[in-house]
Image (cartoon, rainbow, N blue to C red):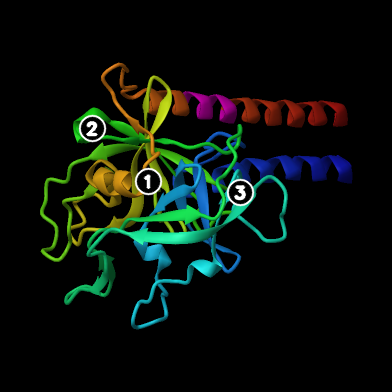
Amino acid sequence: MNAIQRLMIFTLIINCIKEDANRFFGGKISQMGQFPYFAQIIFKENAICGGSLIHPSWVISVAHCLFSAHNKTKQLLSKEVISVVMGRNRRYKPSEKEHHVCMNISRIILRPVDHLRSTNKEDIEISDYDICLLRTRQPFSMSRFIHTIKVSNFGQGLEECRYATFIGVGFKTDHVLYSTTELYKPPFKFPKWYITSTKIFTKALPGQYVFPGDSGGPLVCYYDSIPVLYGTMTSMYNPKNKTLPRLFIYESMEKHIKFIKENVPGVQTFSNKIYTWDRGKTKRSTACVANLIRTSRSFIYFCLVFILTVNHN
């Protein structure tokens, strides 16, 4: 076997390994235009959190992303250094100017009584209502790669959606990833300091984690293939009792819909009366497509290696 053939086989093996490595927390790499409502919140040219475009001029995200991590007074970051990037399926980098639109922020709205506070027993900081709205200086133009998402309305509780899709771009990857997850109602009680009245939960599957940068990402359910914003990622809860599952925690759009409507008059909400909920469809279709792609790639790699081996012999 000559050097060129060895190099080609080595490259194919590396590609197989790389494919699994990209799925580091159960996520799959998104395609351009697959999630046109996904926003990246930028602070001083660094992507710090995710968000969702719910109106051409408004993005919804989580409040804790917009507080200074090194300031003891927890002052809100200046809107002058915050912007929103739309239209990318990769983490924002200042050096990459193509395939995205960037808008500066003109206003930040937190839900009333929203504040960060430290707990007595836990070395973390939490927000009573970890939700915020960001208004852009100019509205985004709608296109195949940039579009708004409808928001879940009153009465669309946990029983309305079994499977959902989470989208994020944590600091561990350069890609916007998505993962299908199952909504979950915890059978246990949370610590007294933790406010759960506005939260919804999904169970973390083996190998699934969230990382800094995933906060604010959308949790989406589907009605007849129409995406509906159901929640926004706020944190992960890891119970001390290891027999209990790890949980991904989201702020529920249903619980904040009054706050959203009061501040974003043109927001589009979704009524499920004339649509059929795609129960399990997202999970099954996503899994089938992913398995088909992986199987096809593996088959192609095998054929190439076989051809190279036969030619050598």
Within 10 angstroms of label 2, few (less than 14), some, or many (20 or more) residues? Answer: some
Q: Residues within 10 Å of mark 3 (few under 14, many from 20)?
A: some
C-beta proximity under 8 Å, tags 2 and 3: no
Task: Identify the amino acid type marked 3.
Answer: Arg
Q: Please give the residue where the numbered disc 1 appears in the rendered image.
A: 264
Residue visible at 44% across and 55% down?
Answer: 134
| Disc 1, SS | loop
Residue type pointed to by label 2: Gln
- Decide if residue 11 is in sight here: yes
Q: Magenta region, mostly helix, strand or loop?
A: helix
Q: Position of residue 60 (x, y in %)?
A: 40, 50
193 displayed left or right of 12: left
For the residues carrying marks 1 and 3, which lies nearer the camera in this image? 1
The quadrant in which residue 298 appears is top right
**Gap in Å between the C-alphas at discs 2 and 1?**
20 Å
Residue depicted at x 34% and y 50%: 263
Q: Disc 2 on helix, strand or loop?
A: loop
Of pointers 1 and 3, the one earlier in the residue sequence: 3
- The part of the chain drawn in magenta is 288-294
Quadrant in which the C terminus appears: top right
Residue placed under numbered mark 2 in the picture: 156
Circle 1 residues within 10 Å: few <14, some 14–19, many ≥20? some
Disc 2 or 3, which lies upstream in sequence?
A: 3
Q: Quadrant of residue 225?
A: top left
Instruction: Tell me what residue is drawn at x 55 percent, y 59 percent.
Output: 83
Q: Give the distance between the C-alpha atoms of the residues marked 2 and 3, in whole angstroms.
A: 31 Å
Q: Which mark is residue 90?
A: 3
Amino acid type at circle 1 is Val
